[in-house]
Image: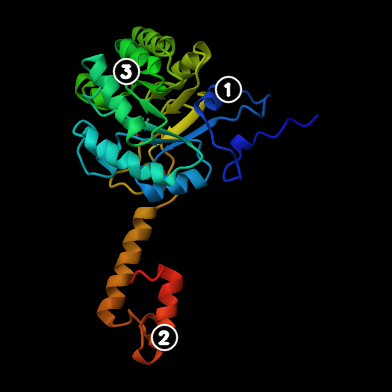
Amino acid sequence: MAPEADMSVIPGGNAAKITVPDLLQRKSWSAADPRKKKITCLTAYDYPTGRLVDEAGVEVVLVGDSVAMVALGYESTLPLTMEEALHHTKAVRRGVQRAVLVADMPFGTYHGDVNEALKNAVRFVKEAHAEAVKVEGGERRLEVIAKLVEAEIPVMGHVGLTPQSVHAMGGYRVQGKTASASEQLLRDARAVETAGAFAIVLEGIPRELAAEITRNVRIPTIGIGAGPDCDGQILVLHDLIGLTFHAPPKFARRYANVGEIISQAVRDYCANVQSGTFPSDTESYHRARVLDWEEDLAVNRDGDW
Ligand code: KIV
């Protein structure tokens, strides 16, 4: 008998809103069970990118603290403030209807007092209408994750190459390469699960270790630079569409070159302005047909201008 259609996994389909409990059901992906398709996640940083990834069928939209580097031009994710993160989360929220919207908690907003962390997490839910928050770290974050979960805020964990630990790690380096580092990462992932997280990002670790962690936790694992055996995958949108100023990391597949498309469009526009071919007559209003364009404006711009 054909498996029952699961509308929640049909990209771009007229599908129902995806929820955190839906994601938990997607654990233990297996080719034998087509209803357990891998979870698709991407970052977004503003209204248009949020809307485009949501409408294309992505199931989890993360307003990553990578916004600091890819959209705000900072050297690392560390300078991002609560106010900046909230501002971007609110913009993405306006574009996302179907996917689960997760807000990344900025460095320093959940590392000290757990009540302070709770206050900050609540702001993402109350002010920016995020459905979940993400925090980096394993065993050390057990208490804070449990605190947020107790307050009914779903939490996504993140272990392995955690960019907020760039100085402690001595750079952006693949983690879990030795046996003892692998054991620690497995303990970290289990701690995140025990604390009550609903999913965990595994970043920059060997494929074999990601597979082992995936087998050993009951919550979905979401890989980035962690091989294909996780329960889902996430990428930084700008790496995928080619809107960065560096070569993409080894694990990121570039599906488009939007940076080049923008540059070419702007070069063409400048050339047209300077040669006098933009705007053309048909792109201009005419005194004699003022009634026509008043009608046009009324239709196209709600008569605003
Ligand atoms: O900030 C981010 O974009 C992330 C993901 C890539 C996991 O943390």
- For disc 1, the marked residue is 25
In percent of width and height, residue 119 lies at 27, 23
| Marked residue nearer the N-terminal end (3 or 1) | 1
| Image-quarter location of ligand 1 | top left
- 62 horizontally vs 244: left or right: right
- For disc 3, the marked residue is 137
Circle 2 residues within 10 Å: few <14, some 14–19, many ≥20: few
Circle number at residue 291 = 2
Amino acid type of the residue tagged 3 in the rendering:
Gly
Q: Say above or below: 83 vs 274.
A: above
Give residue 287's quadrant in the image. bottom left
Amino acid type of the residue tagged 1 in the rendering:
Gln
Decide which of 36, 194 is in the foreground and name it. 194
Circle 1 residues within 10 Å: few <14, some 14–19, many ≥20: few
Residue at (20% x, 40% y) in the render: 74
In percent of width and height, residue 172 lies at 27, 27
Q: Say above or below: 12 vs 177.
A: below
Q: CA distance from mark 2 to mark 3?
A: 63 Å
Residue at (60% x, 35% y) in the render: 8
Which type of secondary structure does the marked residue at label 3 adopt? loop
